[in-house]
Image: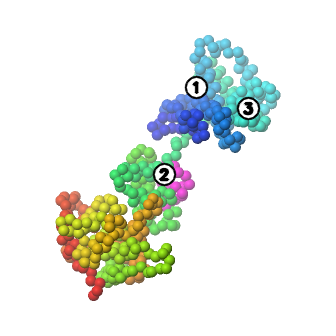
Amino acid sequence: MDYLRRKSDGRWVVRVVVPERLREIVGQKQLERALGRDPRTAQKRAYPLIAEFQATIARAERQLELQGGGNGSSRPRRTFSLSEIAHAHYGEELAIDESARNIPGLYTSLPFSRPIRADGLRRVAAGIAPADETEALIGWAVNKFAEREGRESPLEPAERQSLARTLALVQLEIVEREAERDRGHFTGTPALPILQRPMEAQEPELEPLKLQDLFNAHFRELEIQGAGAEAKRRWQPVFDDLKSFLKRDDARKITPEKLDEWKENLMGRLKPKTIKDVYFAAVRAVFRTALKARKLPSNPAADLTIKVAKPKLPREKGFNDDEALAVLKAASAYRSKPSDNPSNQEHPKTEAAKRWAPWLCAYTGARIAEMTQLRGEDVTTKDGIHYLRITSDAGSVKSGQYRDVPLHPHLIELGFLDFVKASGSEPLFYKPIPDRTTEHPWHSVARRVSDWIRDLKIVDPRVAPNHGWRHRFKTVAVEVGMNNRVMDAIQGHASRTAGENYGDVTLKARKVAIDTLPPYNIKA
């Protein structure tokens, strides 16, 4: 039955949702009663309660009509299946029988003959009883359920006859149970197929465990600490894709086999590295959190893998000398094309990004998004040292940790500080977008810089147009003998050993290291 559910702690409850239009009258969103942990006892107690709850809802329906809140026959009504009616009637009648037996002297004086009553019920069940006999024997039960459904018009004759025959069969089972109880036996079970639904063989399903709820729970603790926003943005499409593929939203129904089917689907659309590093990483992490929180019995994605061929490296990952100079020369000379149509004119901040982002990446080894998210307030001075503070307060930082990177003297010579002063404290390279629902604006700018460099066709297409600077910085830093620990501190790379976590790489030490980098001479 849909109303009988087992909670995560093993307790059974009976629950009936109250239609929204009736909640003010009933005073609750749902009617619920605990049934204990024993499945047989829970099943025995459930059906009378279901009938009671449905009667409460039926009374609320009638009250709404009297208040003028109904909208006639167009209002949706709850229609019970024959199985629900059979179970509810069976449980309710046995509960009444149990209550009657607890009143001393009552049961022996009940004025009916079970054999005669049973014969009549058999005629009703067979469909051969006269109409008056049918009404006398079982009509009260038919009317009871018609009322609980809030019927405004009588049942059609065929529908009423079908319900009467079903309830007659159920009533015969009740007669059998009553006779057994007279002999002191209270463990009898019905033979009627519609009533043969032992809970241990067919347990009611738990409420769906929605993927989005697991996803939100995974990031809840991170959000409290002000972290995880970027990962949440990147991973949301992963779970949207998984839910769309499965065509159902219940994490408990996800099996390793289903995820393997999803994998096959992804392989037809995405690169293996994207599948591994984004899609599979996201699903494994969220399910792992759910497992630790005891929301899932196991992690179906634990063994979800995909082979990613090691990329061939026909050349270095970073820009070579000629490519670096070509990009920086193009950046210095860049001016947006004028347009008579203001809507087609490139925004001045995007123009500034193409002018300055390559230079900043060249002398800091930073990620492109860490540069395009810079604000005027992130460029500051301490002890005479001009430096950039790369912080998650401005946008996204992969490690989540801030770092300070001194400005190379050549950047100051080129006029970067003058540009920052003219920009004020606002973002240097993008216009803030209120109520953003798409990707971060600094990511959009970073992509435009990348596309622009690609379109110039001055660098090898096998080199990432933005990330190539990050590789080149390492190359140049090694050439000038920069200390590895200082190099990693400047670029935001993790320490190699636990010992490297002791002590600090000071701003002064970083400044000394940055000044050892040779300037790029684009005029030669």
Crowd class of label 2 (few under 14; some 14 to 19; many from 20; radius 10 Å):
many
Q: Relative to 267, is 461 on the left or the right?
A: left
Residues at circles 3 and 1 in contact by the CB criterion of under 8 Å: no
Nearer to us: label 3 or label 1: 3
Category of crowding for the residue at label 1, using alpha-carbon neighbours closer than 10 angstroms: few (below 14), some (14–19), many (at least 20): few
Residue receiving disc 2: 211
Q: What residue span does the magenta drawing correspond to?
A: 242-263
Choose between 410 and 82: the one closer to the eye. 410
Residue 359, position as x, y percentages in the image: 31, 76
Look at the image and say whether residue 252 sits in the magenta stretch.
Answer: yes
Q: For this view, does 480 lie left or right of residue 66?
A: left
Q: Is residue 265 left or right of residue 92?
A: left
- Amino acid type, label 3: Ala
Q: Main secondary structure of the magenta part?
A: helix
The mark total stands at 3
The answer to whether one can see residue 331 in this image is: yes
Quadrant of the frame with the C terminus:
bottom left
As shown in the figure, which amino acid type bears the numbered disc 1? Thr
Mark nearest the camera among 1 and 2 is 2
Name the residue furthest bottom. Answer: 524
> Which residue position holds label 1?
187
Q: Amino acid at mark 2?
A: Leu
Residue drawn where x is 30% and y is 64% of the image: 377
Residue under the image location 66 percent in, 39 percent down: 70
How far is disc 3 from disc 1 in space, using C-alphas?
27 Å
- Quarter of the image for residue 115 reads top right
**395 versus 49 height, above or below:** below
Q: Which mark is residue 314?
A: none
Where does label 3 land, which residue?
164
